[in-house]
Amino acid sequence: MARTIIPFGPQHPVLPEPVHLDLVVEDEKVVEARPSIGFIHRGLEKLAEKKDYVEFVYVAERICGICSFIHGQSYCQAIETIMNVTVPPRALYLRTVWGELSRIHSHLLWLGLLADAMGFESLFMHSWRVRERVLNIIEATTGGRVIFGSCKIGGVRRDIDPAMITHIQSEMKTIEKEMREITTVFMNDRSVKSRLCGVGVLTKQEAYELGCVGPMLRASGVAQDMRKLGYAAYKDIPVEPITRTEGDSYARCAVRSEELFQSVDIIRQALERIPDGEIAVKVTGNPNGETIMRTEQPRGEVAYCVKATGSKNLQRFRVRTPTFANLPAMLKVLQGCDLADVPVLVLTIDPCISCTER
Amino acid sequence: MAFFQMTSLVMKWIFRKPVTSRYPFEPRVPLAGSRGKLVFTDGNCVYCTACAKKCPANALIVSRDKKTMEIDRLRCISCGYCVDVCPKKSFSLGEAHSSPVTTKSSELQIHKSGNEETGAPKAAEGNSTSAPK
């Protein structure tokens, strides 16, 4: 059978962001996928040399539109580590709450996109209906819907008052109930299972060797979650990684579905235990030193490397984003799959191309 | 393996009002605390240029001599950093977003002392609108 090359992307209905794949197919089977990235490179790492390190929080948040808060948080944590800044406990709890809200809205967005990729339009709409409730909480507490803008070096910029805490707690009950209805469909529906079960299997060994992170890695049975490092309020609120052993697309969907409820639980605990006090400390001087900060984003582990030399601009800023780590695994699972499964497989790594290219 | 998992969800919502709004006939009301359009109140401003120096998007141009404040609406990201750094509390963030514009000529507004937001829209100056840094 002669080989044919089918271009997939950069503009494709299933892709929220541009990435190009050359799919080498034999009949309907993909034998190789050759990626080309670089469509939305914005040079944000280089911008660290031009912007004041305090202002750069706003740039770090814009690396990704979905995990924006955790990008800002990771950057702030890295600078705080270099400058030996002790962040007030209340700010750490608020960061945890916003980080988990960010995780819920990212996972609901992904579930909706997955339903859309397999042609389940009504499930897509229902996932995003629930996500809208989460976005409303984020807007009411931070002022922004996707770019939170609430994290700063030394703490956070906004507080959540007791009335809003009560409101969030009651909203969480509704959101949890509505998420349960949707995830039941994802987990049990016959048409969903027929598109996901046994598709794109990645063994535990392969996932580990290819350097997967986040739900992609946990779905293959490796219990790795950066929240266990105990940054922010995770030192007080223990997080057990949710894992599956199947390693297929269904397992990746199941891990993300269960993480939704884990995040609701973390938000509930954080709001119950949130201490009173200051939300930020004043930070003076310029950073001088080098550090690596690892945090858990909705898509997986992000690593920030920051090098400062005592001036107001950083000397070097480097981000290793989760999608970049998951791309080799995506190419691996695409080998040997059916052409019709390519959209679902590309989506199961939860690709964020603007993160990857920065 | 189960059939009709979606049916109960569909049946529950089929008799309810849609959650979507009839935009643009029903414009969305921003929630309290939403970060929208930057509002400049001229009364207290001493034109110290702190806001222009700190603005991460270079959206503000302040002239101490002429006592003018220019806000480039297309550059402003409504982050509120100028609100934090202003010593005279001359800035605040409104809840509604800036109106969309069709031409670049309307993006700059000049504010003169004691005469808030009365300056005529200034002609586009291309890339020369960045704040002094």
Image: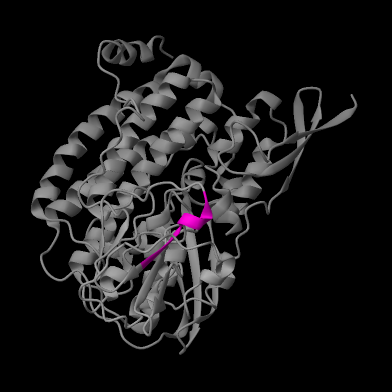
Q: Is residue B133 left or right of residue A325?
A: left
Q: Is residue B109 magenta?
A: yes
Q: Is residue A13 magenta?
A: no
Q: Quadrant of the N terminus of chain B?
A: top left
Q: Is residue A253 left or right of residue A45?
A: left
- Residue A310: quarter of image: bottom left
Instruction: Answer whether residue B14 is visible to the viewer in this image.
Output: yes
Residue A235: % across, % down: 26, 63
Which residue is at 53% across, 20% downward? A119
Q: Which residues are magenta?
A: B103-110
Say if B111 sits above or below B29 in the image.
Answer: below
Residue extending furthest toward the right: A2
Residue A34: % across, % down: 76, 44
Which residue is at 43% across, 48% downward? A66
Q: Is residue B86 left or right of residue A255?
A: left
Residue A311: % across, % down: 47, 88
Instruction: Answer whether residue A240 is visible to the viewer in this image.
Output: no
Label count reads 0
Which residue is at 42% across, 37% downward? A109
Residue A335: % across, % down: 72, 36
Coloring basis for residues: one colour
Q: Is residue A233 left or right of residue A34?
A: left
> Closer to the camera, A291 or A198?
A291
> Closer to the camera, A70 or A51?
A51
